Amino acid sequence: MQREPLSPLPVRLAPGDDESIISLLYRTAQANGMDLQHLRQWLGLPYWVPLPTRSCPALAWISGVSTAWLARRAIQTTLLSGAQRYLFMDHEFGKGSINFACRARICPFCVKRQKYTRAAWQLRTICGCVEHACILMDSCPVCGALLDWQRPAIDICRCGRFLTAPAQQPPPLPERVSNWIRWNEARLKNPETTIPAETFGLPKLLSTLSIDGALRFVLSIGLHPHPAALEHADDRRHLSSEGTCVQVGRALERLTAIGDQLGNLASLGPLAHQPALERLRSHGISESDRRYAAWLLATLQGGRDAASGSGRRQRGQLSLFE
């Protein structure tokens, strides 16, 4: 059946400055008597993430926002130096840093007040709301279902229960993880500015990494709780916000304990997730990303030449960023 021609939607909503595209589209679709699935079909889009670059002007036109606002917040794919990259908020990212699942992560306090979710929450390790010091909610505390965008309202689960009831408040956000989120949100907003990690109480060595490199490096350092867990690595793509918070907090604690010298990273060898580091070494956004990963891999592999790809992968480890 032929699609109806595109036209500006009758009801247009003003976006929040830090709002995610999926959140604005969800609110706009509901205001016009549709849901996201019907809106996507009307636009002829196979998916929302990544968003085809050619679709940005049309999407901005029908929703009444500027193309520049929408394009900056859209996750778009590109091919740079033979590797697939993703552009988001004027930064480059690898696949492992982006939350591609069309699932919702909300702060119940934010959606109660302003009815939207933030763009930064599309990054996997941004697992909490620093304004309300809580871990993001990604499943209904009543029925246990994962939150998606096909539900009656942004603050209501498919089961009909409100997600903002006082008895359903999410766990508190640890201070160390809150500092991590603040630093990365500041970097997202200011892509042309160098913001040292130590100004947020974080290990200095993170400052030389790109925002994508820092995200992936921390994930690789915090994945395993102890050496015995190397044989039982989970698929991190389905990790909850609460689980991610634990993982990030564990990584930051380890990095803080060893100090700011690169040489001290060798002590993390038994705990580091090698496949994640291998991918960062091969496809890191910056030279510093690749250098850090190569150095640690060379140490883990007994001094073998990390740049050549020689060295063995430990058994039982799943590829974190495939």
Image (tube, helix red, strand yellow):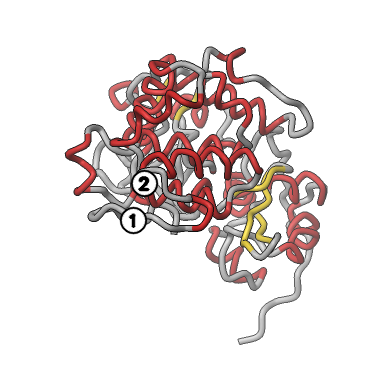
Picture quadrant of residue 189: top right
Query: Which residue lies at the image location 75% right of the left edge and 75% below the top edge?
Result: 5
**Residue flagged by tag 1: what amino acid is it?**
Arg
Query: Which residue lies at the image location 67% right of the left edge and 47% below the top edge?
Result: 92
Nearer-the-camera pick, 66 or 216: 216
Q: Is residue 290 left or right of residue 140?
A: right
Q: Could you say where residue 249 lies in the image, as x and y percent from the top left?
A: 38, 25
Quarter holding the C terminus? bottom left
Nearer-the-camera pick, 118 or 304: 304
Quarter holding the N terminus? bottom right
- Residue designated by label 2: 301
Q: Is residue 148 left or right of residue 67?
A: left
**Residue flagged by tag 2: what amino acid is it?**
Gln
Picture quadrant of residue 61: bottom right
Q: Is residue 75 visible?
A: yes
Q: Could you say where residue 37 lies in the image, as x and y percent from the top left?
A: 53, 64
Q: Could you say where residue 162 lies in the image, as x and y percent from the top left?
A: 36, 35
First-in-chain label (1 vs 2): 2
- Residue designated by label 1: 312
Q: Could you say where residue 209 lies in the image, as x and y percent from the top left?
A: 61, 34
